[in-house]
Image (spheres, rainbow, N blue to C red):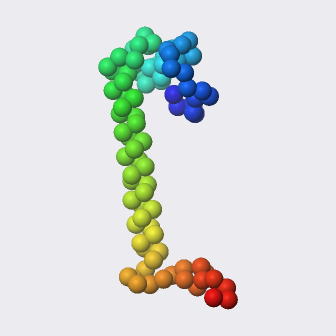
Amino acid sequence: MGSGKPKTEIPVYGSETGTQLKKFQKDQGLAVDGVAGKLTLTRVDDLLMSQQQSSCNAAAENAALAAQMAGPKGNRPFAATTARRGA
């Protein structure tokens, strides 16, 4: 986890899954037992929720920036640069 996307998805808990789970547990300061128990899964959920919240914040910031760039309502700040030539 955290080292990028998996090369392939496997439907079983193999040795690579166990290795990555133990690495995740160690990196997160959890008990390293290779079992995706309540504490481990809670930490995974927390990280996923944090990433989702971060994405929402970035989208809101981008929308606010776009609104600032647009200027007053009805203004078309990019109209001159996006108009078709010869139209």
Is residue 56 placed above or below 70 in the rendered structure? above
Q: Residue at x 38, y 21 (%)?
A: 40
Is residue 53 placed above or below 28 in the rendered structure? below
Q: Quadrant of residue 58?
A: bottom left
Whole-percent x and y of residue 48?
40, 36
Residue 29 seen: yes
Give left or right: position of 1 versus 42.
right
> For this rendering, which residue is in front, 11 or 26?
11
Q: Residue at x 42, y 57 (%)?
A: 59
Whole-percent x and y of residue 71?
43, 80
Give left or right: position of 83 versus 68.
right
Whole-percent x and y of residue 6?
58, 29
How many numbered marks have been drawn onto this rendered protein structure? 0
Q: Residue at x 62, y 28 (%)?
A: 7
Q: Residue at x 37, y 27 (%)?
A: 43
Residue 19 seen: no
Residue most extreme to the bottom: 86
Q: Split into 4 quadrants, where in the image is the C terminus?
A: bottom right
Whole-percent x and y of residue 72?
39, 83
Residue most extreme to the right: 86
Is residue 69 placed above or below 9 in the rendered structure? below
Q: Quadrant of residue 75?
A: bottom left
